[in-house]
Image (tube, coloured by chain):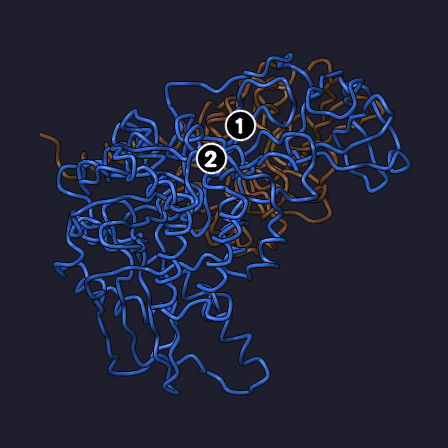
Chain colours: A blue, B brown
């Protein structure tokens, strides 16, 4: 059998942002300074899901001239008073690591894919792995989650422990490669899941070629049940209408009243920021519909109140339009008119972050120096989609020489001109596929040679595969495509000129 | 001491002066002299410019050159797609890709409405197959004058004189022909010069 080839290896990341942070703190009041999504594992150990905060943290760390991890570390230290934390791609990964580090009596903030931790992985004992697994199982058991998967967990775990002691394996590093399916077959679903989270299985369809884009996927997150932790009640504001309404123009003024009440509540005042609201609408037939209203950046509702709730109302409008089309679809076979008569609603503040006053000024999302960029960031808060910027980066491989970035990270002083090592004046398409697509030569009506470039031959199976001849081709469906031919005369479609 | 009447006269004169400045032809300043010459009568600001830009014809290259030459922020609205914009294509035309912001969504019109109402950006490109009604065009035309903004309306078909559009100032077709290796620009409304042919070597 081969040695274990992946230990918590969720793939190469494009940057240092990790989805989860597992931390230990004795200060429960300031838990929500990092993220509105917190899960309590045990007394003083918590997991934060940073997904909803990614755009904000990238922008804020950029403006504070720090890396994302340095910024997160600062918030953990200053606000949450956490002395030990791990940034990781999977909560179970972080929990095992933090338990191991606690045993070693270590303090600080660590990245799961750092060299330091990677060297520690082979020394992590199965004792820690098992105690972490048992802890997670007890949480799920308390909340009655994954009941069928956890059946006979303790019996199966005892058998697993016997198996390990029989093989005289105590640490990760001593383990030979064992397929996830074997573990699942012998020890049932839940232990199989835990195993998959610890030793991610590479997709059989994954290509040999290293994809230098971010290919850490959230596929491995499947099965992990998130249990949100709150120790205070969410503020809820009810609004009852004197007469039913159905159109946005009639709803808006009443909604403004609700938002005004909300903005005056102590629970949402600065330095608190809102990340999500839930708008529950009651219709004439007493049915209720709950609509989630998320915010891309932490919203200071008091500031928005000064601007007549422009940002908040825009998001409510988007939610209302989706709601209307949903009802229309539902009722399309009925002949009623005015089916959307609304009698009232409630607005619940479901997700907030709570930075301390020390770091609250860092939560200002707008860069006051640049008005134009400020307007675009402000626009992003008002629309449902994201605003993307595409920048180039040094790489001689076409397709890997650019990346998608956050609008808040555009550096005004730095022009993004050609930084590819190849001749920047060569004819390039405006649209590019994530990966080259195989192209049938018969689809090409006419082609014109553009240039020769190199491939990432060092990961190719074929040593001779070292170049690509790029062409602009006209295809049978009248498209102008950017295609290349490799040394085997195989054609691939890589981009679209228009 | 200026009287009420003279104050009104001064403010009206200032307004007329502003309008006159706006109506002055501005032209463009790309690295291509022939293209600049062709568009020398183009008044880029406070206008809606309709481009005939069907797919597969590299039709967006000429508008990109014009947009790049302004050195201003551009908001580009387009339909949701799997492909990504390739920054180096802009850089190869000496255009700063950081000036271009892309919004790719299913329902582009909603975000477009917000951007136009908020006057978030002076130059907007509307590159969608979604049907744009006459009232929308009227709205865009009015807003472009009020906000002194430029809206590029990319159509996924070639424009023709058979179907006019009173809401836009300029109507231009552009395309690339692979066999002759040339870019063709043809204005059907707004400019005095009708067509231009540029060889690929001139552009790259």
Residue A377: image location, x then y, percent: 36, 39
Q: Which residue is mark 1?
A: B67
Q: Which mark is residue A79?
A: none
| Closer to us: A68 or B45 | A68
Q: Which residue is found at the position 71% from the left and 23% from the top?
A: B196
Q: Circle 1 — which element?
A: helix
- Label 1 resides on the chain identified as B
Q: Which residue is mark 2?
A: B123
Number of callouts in the render?
Answer: 2
Q: Which residue is found at the position 44% from the left and 51% from the top?
A: B113
- Vertically, is A301 above or below A494? below
Quadrant position of the C terminus of chain A in the picture: top right
Tell me if I can see residue A297 in this picture: yes
Mark sitting earlier along the chain (2/1) = 1
- Label 2 resides on the chain identified as B
Q: Which residue is found at the position 58% from the left and 19% from the top?
A: A395
Q: Residue furthest left?
A: B1
| Closer to us: A486 or A18 | A18
Q: Gap between marks 2 and 1, in whole Å?
A: 8 Å
Residue B131: image location, x then y, percent: 61, 55
């Amino acid at each position: 059998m081969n040695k274990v080839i992946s230990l918590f290896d969720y793939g190469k990341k494009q940057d240092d942002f990790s989805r989860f942070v597992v931390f230990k703190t004795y200060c429960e009041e300031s838990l929500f300074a990092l993220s509105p999504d917190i899960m309590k594992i045990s007394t003083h150990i918590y997991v934060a899901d940073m997904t909803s905060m990614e755009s904000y943290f990238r922008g804020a760390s950029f403006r504070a001239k720090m890396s994302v991890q340095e910024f997160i570390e600062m918030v953990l230290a200053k606000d949450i008073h956490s002395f030990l934390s791990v940034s990781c791609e999977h909560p179970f990964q972080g929990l095992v690591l933090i338990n191991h580090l606690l045993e070693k009596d270590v303090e600080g903030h660590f990245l799961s894919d750092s060299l330091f931790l990677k060297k520690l992985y082979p020394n992590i004992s199965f004792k820690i792995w098992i105690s972490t697994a048992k802890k997670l199982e007890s949480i799920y058991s308390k909340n009655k989650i994954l009941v069928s998967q956890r059946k006979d967990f303790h019996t199966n775990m005892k058998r697993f422990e016997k198996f390990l002691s029989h093989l005289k394996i105590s640490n990760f590093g001593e383990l030979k490669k064992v397929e996830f399916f074997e573990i699942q077959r012998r020890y049932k679903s839940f232990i199989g899941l835990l195993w998959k989270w610890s030793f991610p299985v590479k997709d059989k369809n994954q290509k040999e070629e290293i994809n230098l884009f971010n290919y850490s996927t959230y596929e491995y997150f499947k099965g992990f049940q998130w249990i949100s932790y709150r120790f205070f009640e969410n503020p809820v504001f009810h609004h009852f209408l004197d007469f039913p309404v159905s159109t946005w123009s009639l709803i808006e003024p009443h909604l403004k009243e609700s938002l005004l009440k909300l903005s005056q509540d102590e629970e949402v005042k600065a330095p608190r920021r809102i990340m999500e609201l839930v708008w529950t609408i009651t219709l004439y037939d007493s049915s209720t519909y709950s609509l989630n209203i998320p915010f891309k950046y932490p919203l200071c509702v008091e500031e928005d109140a000064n601007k007549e709730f422009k940002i908040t109302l825009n998001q409510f409008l988007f939610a209302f339009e989706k709601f209307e089309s949903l009802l229309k679809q539902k009722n399309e076979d009925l002949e009623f008119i005015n089916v959307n008569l609304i009698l009232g609603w409630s607005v619940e503040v479901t997700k907030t972050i709570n930075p301390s006053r020390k770091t609250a000024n860092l939560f200002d999302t707008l860069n006051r120096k640049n008005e134009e960029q400020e307007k675009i960031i402000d626009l992003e808060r008002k629309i449902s989609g994201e605003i993307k910027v595409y920048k180039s980066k040094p790489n001689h491989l076409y397709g890997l020489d650019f990346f998608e970035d956050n609008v808040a990270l555009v550096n005004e002083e730095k022009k993004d001109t050609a930084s590819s090592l190849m001749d920047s004046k060569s004819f390039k398409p405006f649209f590019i596929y994530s990966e080259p697509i195989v192209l049938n030569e018969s689809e090409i009506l006419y082609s014109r040679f553009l240039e020769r470039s190199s491939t990432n031959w060092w990961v190719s199976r074929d040593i001779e595969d070292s170049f690509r001849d790029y062409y602009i081709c006209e295809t049978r469906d009248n498209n102008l495509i950017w295609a290349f031919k490799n040394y085997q005369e195989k054609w691939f479609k890589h981009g679209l000129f228009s | 001491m200026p009287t009420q009447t003279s104050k009104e006269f001064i403010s009206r004169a200032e307004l007329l002066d502003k309008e006159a400045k706006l109506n002055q032809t501005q032209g463009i300043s790309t690295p291509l002299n022939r293209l600049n010459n062709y568009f020398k009568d183009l008044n880029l600001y406070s206008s809606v410019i309709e481009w005939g830009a069907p797919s597969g014809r590299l039709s967006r290259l000429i508008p990109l050159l014009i947009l790049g030459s302004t050195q201003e922020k551009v908001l580009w609205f387009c339909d949701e797609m799997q492909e990504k914009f390739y920054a180096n294509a802009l850089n190869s035309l000496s255009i700063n890709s950081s000036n271009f912001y892309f919004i790719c969504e299913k329902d582009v019109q909603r975000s477009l409405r917000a951007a136009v109402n908020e006057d978030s950006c002076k130059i907007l490109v509307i590159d969608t197959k979604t049907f744009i009604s006459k009232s929308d065009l009227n709205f865009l035309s009015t807003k472009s004058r009020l906000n002194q903004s430029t809206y590029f309306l990319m159509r996924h078909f070639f424009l023709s004189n058979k179907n006019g559009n009173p809401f836009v100032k300029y109507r231009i077709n552009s395309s690339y022909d692979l066999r002759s290796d040339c870019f063709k620009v043809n204005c059907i409304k707004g400019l005095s010069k009708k067509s231009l042919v540029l060889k690929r070597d001139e552009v790259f």
